Image (cartoon, grey):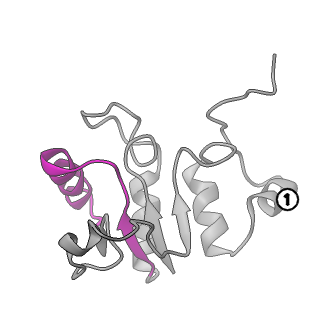
Amino acid sequence: MIIAVDFDGTIVQDNYPLIGKERPFAMQTLRMLQDEGHQLILWTVRKGIQLDEAVEWCRERGVEFYAVNKDFPEEDEQQNERYSRKIKVDIFIDDRNVGGLPDWGVIYQMIHEDKTLEEILSEGSGRCKNKRKWWQF
């Protein structure tokens, strides 16, 4: 599977432009997914030095991305200026997801067991921390 992963707020707590603290089990989960043969793409608004710092931060923790902000490593960046930057992946992992970011253990379970969040929650084996609880007054 090809999986796009956001950095700020997803892998680390949002402290942009600095690198925040790692979200619990984020890097461990990404390493496990990588070990299972999934291709990980870092998909972030970071660029330049801040992007290089994020890539190196992940590399130091054992995660090498298949590509960064593009579909494949050889993709021509100049060509990207003329075309849509929507990448072609199977899954996006992002803190801006509808309903918030599930715990990384739940994310792994969804991918590894090919289950929906609803299936995992109905089994009672997962927790989901919502970023915003707009329905609660």
Range of the magenta residues? 38-63
Point out the residue furthest to the right here: 122
In magenta stretch: residue 43: yes
In the rendered structure, the answer to whether residue 19 lies left or right of residue 99 reads: left
In this view, which residue lies farthest toward the front? 82
For the residue marked with disc 1, what is the amino acid?
Glu
Residue in the image at 27% along x and 37% along y: 19
Residue sitting nearer the eye, 58 or 45: 45
Answer above or below: position of 34 versus 95.
Answer: below
The image quadrant where one finds the C terminus is top right
13 shown above or below 78: above
Can residue 78 be seen here? The reply is yes
Q: Residue 130: percent from the left, percent from the top?
A: 67, 37
Q: Residue at x 66, y 30 (%)?
A: 132
Q: Position of residue 29 (x, y in %)?
A: 47, 61
Q: Quadrant of residue 112?
A: bottom right
Question: Image height check: is 77 above or below 19?
Answer: below
Q: Which residue is mark 1?
A: 123
Residue that lies at the very extreme toward the left in this rendered image: 49
